[in-house]
Image (tube, rainbow, N blue to C red):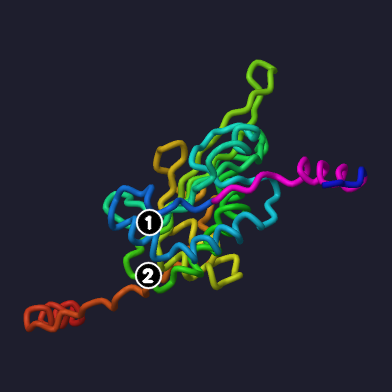
Amino acid sequence: MYMYKGTFVLVVAMAVIVPRSFPQVLSPPEILDPAMRALQQKHLPELKAAAVDIASHQYPYRFYLSRKLDLTERQEQQNDQRSIRFSNFQGHTVLQVTGNYFASYSEDSMNQNERVKQTYLDVMLPILRATASRLGGETELNAFAIEIAHHVRKKVFGVAVEHPENLALIVPFATAEKIASSNNVEDQMTALLQSRVFIDGKPASFWPDPVEETPPTPPLARAIVSPPPPAIRDLSPNALGKQQTFIKG
């Protein structure tokens, strides 16, 4: 078959520019747990549709779904990206999504809470919306488990070094459903505050935020202060007798 030179150059250029396409949903036979495998098979169309949304979303920095954390970008481009799967987390059924986000935060200008919140808003929130909006009718699903590795840079003895920081977020099903249908910023931050957060495998807390002197704005931190109860008046004969004596005297 004859190919014009110009056409050949165009095909080669497209092969260089267009990244390799990877499946991003784990195939059901690869899941060993029978219950999780059944859910994976049942929701395979929804998971594939969610994967399309996740892959096509415009992130501030490059993001890849991945079976492994802490990969270099070159490794990631050649690595298994089948990341979306049902799994068992401490006895609970979760939809697990893992990925590497190639944002590099400065430790001097962003503390840990700020870094986590930024990755949550930039990456985890779109993932929650893509998945929770499609699995609303699944009664066996308890939560969404999202694992993301981003990078942190700092200077050590004047030399710039960079290391990965692994964030895991366990979002309750009802919370994920709520934010999937909401564009309200308070709803988005509520999801973070109501979730279990792990940083490099260790539990972390975002309440209260160490950089804030007061809790976040209502309704996240609304405290209803009840008025003090009225004083109880003693109407016993003995108390009334003492009161009369005090008045006469």
Query: Is residue 13 shown in magenta?
Result: yes
Residue 192: x and y, percent? 49, 56
Label disc, if present, on residue 138 of the rendered structure: 2
**20 or 161, which lies in front?**
20
147 is higher (above) or lower (below) than 76: below
Under mark 1, the amino acid is Val
Labelled disc at residue 55:
none
The answer to whether the residue labelled 1 contacts the one labelled 2, judged by CB atoms less than 8 Å apart, is: no
Three-letter amino acid code at the position of disc 2? Glu
Tell me residue 109's x, y (percent).
Answer: 67, 38
Q: Is residue 12 left or right of residue 197?
A: right
Q: Residue at label 1? A: 94
Neighbour tally class for label 1: few under 14, some 14-19, many 20 plus, Cα within 10 Å: many
Secondary structure under badge 1?
strand
Residue 162 lies in the magenta stretch:
no
Q: Tag 2's secondary structure?
A: loop
What is the quadrant of residue 158 in the picture?
top right
Magenta segment, which residues? 6-23
